C-alpha cells in the first residue's frame, strides 16, 4: 500500500512538473500551429 501511494505522488509530481516545463518551452499546440496566415483567439 505504501508503494502504491508513493507511486501516485510521483505521478502527480511528474505530471505537474512536465506541464510547467512544456509551457515554458513553448510546446503548446497554439504556439506550434501559429503562423503568419493563422488567426487564433487570445
Image (cartoon, rainbow, N blue to C red):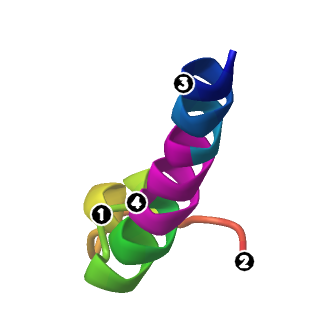
Say what secondary structure mark 3 lies in.
helix
Task: Tell me where residue 26 sits by quadrant.
Answer: bottom left
Give residue 10's mark: none
- Residue 13 in magenta stretch: yes
* Residue segment shown in magenta: 10-18
Q: CA distance from mark 3 to mark 4?
A: 22 Å
Residue located at (63% from left, 44% from top): 9
Q: N-terminal of the two: label 4 or label 1?
A: 4
Residue tagged by mark 4?
18
Mark found first going from the N terminus, 3 or 4: 3
Residue at x 51% of width, y 45% of height = 10
Q: Are marks 4 and 1 in contact (CB under 8 Å)?
A: no
Which dot, 3 or 1, sits closer to the camera? 3
- Pointer 3 residue: 3
Residue 22 x %, y %: 35, 67
Main secondary structure found in the magenta portion: helix
Q: Within 10 angstroms of label 4, few (less than 14), some, or many (20 or more) residues?
A: few
Q: Is 2 on the left or on the right of 37, as rendered?
A: right
- Label 2 vs label 4: CA separation? 23 Å
Amino acid at each position: 500500500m505504501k508503494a502504491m501511494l508513493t507511486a501516485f505522488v510521483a505521478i502527480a509530481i511528474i505530471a505537474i512538473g512536465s506541464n510547467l516545463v512544456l509551457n515554458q518551452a513553448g510546446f503548446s499546440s497554439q504556439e506550434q500551429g501559429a503562423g503568419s496566415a493563422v488567426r487564433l483567439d487570445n
